[in-house]
Image: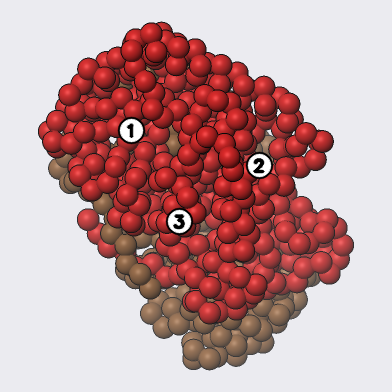
Chain colours: A brown, B red
Amino acid sequence: METRALHPPAEVGADLDHVDTPALLLDLDAFERNLDRLHATLAGLPVRVRPHAKSHKCPEIALRQVARGAIGVCCQKVSEAEALVAGGIPDVTIVNEVVGAAKLARLAALAREARVGVAVDDFQNVNDVDTAAADARVILDVLVEVDVGLNRCGVEPGQAAAALACRVAEKSHLRFAGLQAYQGRAQHVRSYDDRRLAAAAAADKVQATLDHLSRAGLHAATVTGGGTGTYLFDARSSVYNEVQPGSYVFMDADYAQNLDQEGHVVRTFEQSLFVLTTVMSHPTRSRAVVDAGLKAHSVDSGMPLVAAVPGARHTRASDEHGVIELAGPGDLSLGQKIRLIPGHCDPTVNLHDWFVCFRGERVEAVWPITARGAFY
Amino acid sequence: METRALHPPAEVGADLDHVDTPALLLDLDAFERNLDRLHATLAGLPVRVRPHAKSHKCPEIALRQVARGAIGVCCQKVSEAEALVAGGIPDVTIVNEVVGAAKLARLAALAREARVGVAVDDFQNVNDVDTAAADARVILDVLVEVDVGLNRCGVEPGQAAAALACRVAEKSHLRFAGLQAYQGRAQHVRSYDDRRLAAAAAADKVQATLDHLSRAGLHAATVTGGGTGTYLFDARSSVYNEVQPGSYVFMDADYAQNLDQEGHVVRTFEQSLFVLTTVMSHPTRSRAVVDAGLKAHSVDSGMPLVAAVPGARHTRASDEHGVIELAGPGDLSLGQKIRLIPGHCDPTVNLHDWFVCFRGERVEAVWPITARGAFY
């Protein structure tokens, strides 16, 4: 183990203009409205909320999600779960497979401190998870992951999933807790109807699996899935009883392209996350260069948008630079700080050590992203 | 300031198979051959070597570059320079603009501990750099950045660059040190002849600028540029006297597409950098899923390659997963550790806190990437 010193880019109480750049900004008003809106849109529906903490990697945010009614959070990695439990979250499900004796030993140890769940999609892995739980003398909640169209991890719906669930149920240190059935590909389907149909197709696969489980005498107490793009469809499906949206707290340029029933951009959630960056070069009247590049935001889902500079387009990202084409001369000046809306929020957050949380033009808090880099 | 505990994914002396994943592996034999080859290819040419430390962000590597004859290193950010000086490097040039009073104060303060240079491309910025140097009572080396075809930062070659150089030379706390003239776009031009011509066009622009400087009575002691793709052309150009390759220590899938005179892949440098990852799901005979995704390597220059698994293709990366399509059943098994060759080395390194350095199948060292996240 080693400790490293980290300097936050701002002090609490500072004016936003004194924040060092690049910095990850969180608009607290928008963030809090997003937290509230998730629950408001789900009012009266028979689902629990278990937000995905892979998006924020920050116990401060997880605590606020739980305070608003989330039953806990989910995440992807044992090291993320460790950071969240250390940060005060008592209920964490790893909705992902954990493979290898060292990781499984850490997972089982964590179950002594908090309620911990994990997903499986392989018979041998079920044996290994059970062995780790037995060694640690804990009982682990285990979800069988079903591939409902993502074509990534997970067993086939129906008979195959039920067979794996039976194996889980046989194990002395595992509790069959239900199904993990996340349709990641459906989240960013742009058209409302196509997105609804993709979610419905996933729900059909879940229902077929539930039927097989029922015949095998097994009950799935939890059926979880549903990201920011489909959670409302999933919540209304009558098969999911838990949703796990993550990006809703922040939003990003990718999600901002999803459309509603009328063909307008979905406006349920607001953009609360920005990369603050400084104009560090302005070589021509139409080109400005900012000090945030690939190491400050992720372009895997496309270029960031430029907030509040009409007509400005972020056209190119290199490691430490962003090139912005301007609509009019004089739109930006050297040293000016502007906000970028990241293309994809999750891997962008993972590049930063802090959220600089602001209200109005003042830094209200600086929250450490304690699970940044926690990919073990 | 805050300190955070970081756990390396391996212990010195461990077998490679016991390294936790995802992990950034450095093949020390290949790495050392790369260090040597750079100098071997430059033997007899009138250039100094100042490797770019933005690629590795690691004083341990910078020290080895200096030990092999580099005159120092360059980097992009003040916080990188601070980490490098703290790690024992006495000569660091920031070949990039530094804008804003807070950053400039830190830059000037660093010049009390080491020889420090910086690039400029704006008259007001020259004034600001001089003010910061005067306040700190130091003399800063200043390079005028010339845009030789990258269309990012930098002033136009010729008259414009000479005018800015004159401004630098007038300042009491600045020393006009020469030209920064990096043609980033030329580095990845695939064909040998096209790459050579792109480098030659940049050299012509530098020469025109030198002529203007000469008429203004100014001498550019340093003319620096040249990355891993063009450094040899630049070294032979008779205008550059310093080259700043960075990726050569590691290589990546992008650079592995550059061709030599015969149309074969350039083999001057070997792949020394890998992301070690575990097969965490193997849902079908032709599809395996590994535990490294967008948070463990950067896909901005394309998908990673799969090392040593014939026919295997990494087709899709999500935040924490990589999907690999297999040529034959039985090619991979659950829990197996394999190596990915990153699409782009620099932003990949920035996602990790450690290089796990190995020789043969044994971990020989674990080097901290102390400037990881140092984008201020």
The image position of residue A350, as x and y in percent, is 44, 51
Label 3: state its secondary structure.
helix
Marks 1 and 3 sit apart, C-alpha to C-alpha, by 23 Å
Query: Which quadrant of the structure image shows residue B128?
Result: top left
Instruction: Please name whichever residue, A218 or B61, is drawn nearer the observer in this view of the structure.
Output: B61
Query: Which quadrant of the structure image shows residue B120?
Result: top left
The image position of residue A209, as x and y in percent, is 72, 65
Mark 1 residue type: Val
Query: Who comes first in sequence, dot 2 or dot 3?
Result: 3
Q: Residue at x 15, y 42 (%)?
A: A13
* Whether residue A69 is visible: no
Query: Which quadrant of the structure image shows residue B254?
Result: top right
| Chain at tag 2 | B
* Whether residue B335 is visible: yes
Query: Which of the numbered marks, if any, corresponds to residue B118?
Result: 1
In the rendered image, the vertical position of residue B368 relative to residue A309, given as above or below: below
- The residue labelled by disc 2 is B255
| Labels 2 and 3 share a subunit | yes
Mark 2 residue type: Tyr
In the rendered image, the vertical position of residue B173 relative to residue A59, given as above or below: above
Marks 1 and 2 sit apart, C-alpha to C-alpha, by 27 Å
In the rendered image, the vertical position of residue A294 relative to residue A290, given as above or below: below
Q: Residue at x 53, y 41 (%)?
A: B245
Structural crowding at the residue carrying mark 1, measured as other residues with C-alpha within 10 Å and reported as few (<14), some (14–19) or many (≥20): many
- The residue labelled by disc 3 is B67
Label 2: state its secondary structure.
helix
| Pointer 1 with pointer 3, Cβ within 8 A | no
Instruction: Please name whichever residue, A268 or B354, is drawn nearer the observer in this view of the structure.
Output: B354
Instruction: Please name whichever residue, B123 or A23, is drawn nearer the observer in this view of the structure.
Output: B123
